[in-house]
Amino acid sequence: MKNFTKAERFAEFLLRLNAAPPAITREEAFEFLGKTLIEVEDELTDIPFMPENWQTDGRMYPPQEDSARDVPGRSDLVRYRSRGHHTYIRANGAIEVRDLAGRVIISKKGSDGAGVELEG
């Protein structure tokens, strides 16, 4: 049985995200982020991948396209709303995850060296 806590699994996800080369496009970043989170959860928990149970099963799931929101004044940026955070992905492949209070959890630059660059 795998007994990693959600915090430990999230920390591993962040390590892998940081260690990876930058994405080139928003689509590539979105796909990589999802693939990485699923891999971490598959390796570190026995909870089966069943997205329909996301609210109750204790597994972390990647953002879905139906949770995408526009960012006013930023046509190059998409925000994905999740239970405890917002994930921003820029057209250049940059990724930033913020908690609901707006604190940055991770900021990864895109292939051109620029980050998400949110104000505030």
Image (cartoon, grey):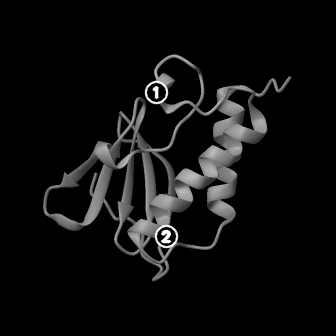
Q: Where's residue 77, x and y in %?
A: 28, 63
Q: Nearer the viewer, residue 45 or 52?
A: 52
Instruction: Name the element at disc 1.
Output: helix
Depth-wise, is mark 1 or mark 2 nearer the camera? 1
Label 1 vs 2, first from the N-terminus? 1
Q: Quadrant of the N terminus?
A: top right
What amino acid is found at the position of numbered circle 1 in the picture? Answer: Glu
Q: Nearer the viewer, residue 28 or 85?
A: 28
Q: Where's residue 72, x and y in %?
A: 14, 56
Q: Residue at x 27, y 57 (%)?
A: 119
> From what the image shows, is residue 102 above or below residue 51?
below
Find the residue positioned furthest to the bottom.
112
Find the residue positioned furthest to the top.
56
> From what the image shows, is residue 86 above or below residue 26?
above
Left or right: residue 119 compared with residue 6: left
> From what the image shows, is residue 45 above or below residue 24?
above
Total numbered labels placed on residues in the image: 2
What amino acid is found at the position of numbered circle 2 in the picture? Answer: Lys
Q: Residues within 10 Å of mark 2 (few under 14, many from 20)?
A: many
Which label sits on residue 52? 1
> From what the image shows, is residue 2 above or below residue 29?
above
Please say if the residues under marks 1 and 2 sit with CB atoms less than 8 Å apart. Answer: no
Instruction: Name the element at disc 2.
Output: loop
Q: Residue at x 48, y 79 (%)?
A: 113
Q: Quadrant of residue 100?
A: top left
Which label sits on residue 109? 2
Q: Quadrant of residue 57?
A: top right
Left or right: residue 76 compared with residue 112: left
Which label sits on residue 27? none
How far is mark 1 from mark 2, CA to CA? 32 Å
Left or right: residue 17 compared with residue 73: right
Q: Where's residue 58, x and y in %?
A: 59, 22
